Image: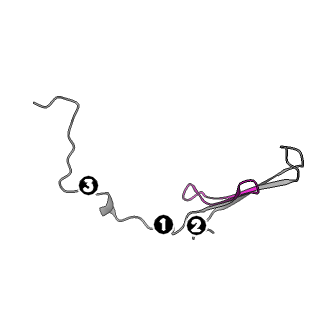
């Protein structure tokens, strides 16, 4: 559970041996990702690479409540105009 949402995690760790990419010591890179099937998105991700540093991204304040329908009602003065034919 992350932020109240069920998620499945995956961690991939890659080790570059000495000399593999011109490195003078072993390099260990890891990427961890937690994905919510319910939301269809990644809710937490962490990348760790000694060459570029650590990075973490997390979806926060997740609300599973249905938004108020009023948010999707067009304003009273809203109108659709057909611009495909010339005006008289």
Q: Earlier in the sequence, mark 2 or mark 1?
A: 2
* Residue 6 x %, y %: 61, 65
Q: Name the side, left or right, on which 24 lies relative to 34.
A: right
Residue 64, disc: 1
User: Which range of residues does the magenta coloring cover?
Assistant: 30-53
Magenta-drawn stretch, dominant element (helix, strand or loop):
strand
**Camera-nearest residue between 62 and 15:** 15
The image shows residue 85, relative to residue 46, as above or below, that is: above
Whole-angstrom CA distance, mark 2 to mark 1, is 9 Å
Q: Name the side, left or right, on which 3 lies relative to 10.
A: left
Q: Earlier in the sequence, mark 1 or mark 3?
A: 1
Whole-angstrom CA distance, mark 1 to mark 3, is 24 Å
Label 3 neighbour load within 10 Å: few <14, some 14-19, many 20+: few
In this view, the mark in front (1 or 3): 3
In which image quadrant can residue 85 be found? top left
Q: Earlier in the sequence, mark 3 or mark 2?
A: 2
Residue 74, disc: 3
Q: How is the image coloured?
A: one colour
In which image quadrant can residue 55 be found? bottom right
In the image, what residue occupies the spot 20% across and 40% down?
81
Residue 5, disc: 2
Mark 2 residue element: loop
Mark 1 residue element: loop
């Amino acid at each position: 559970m992350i932020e109240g949402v069920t998620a499945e995690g995956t961690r991939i760790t890659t080790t570059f041996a000495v000399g593999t990419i011109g490195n003078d010591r072993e390099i260990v890179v890891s990427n961890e990702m937690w994905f919510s099937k319910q939301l269809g998105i990644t809710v937490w991700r962490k990348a760790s690479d000694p060459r570029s540093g650590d990075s973490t991204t997390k979806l926060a304040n997740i609300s599973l409540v249905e938004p108020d329908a009023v948010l999707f009602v067009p304003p009273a003065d809203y109108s659709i105009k057909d611009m495909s034919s010339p005006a008289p």
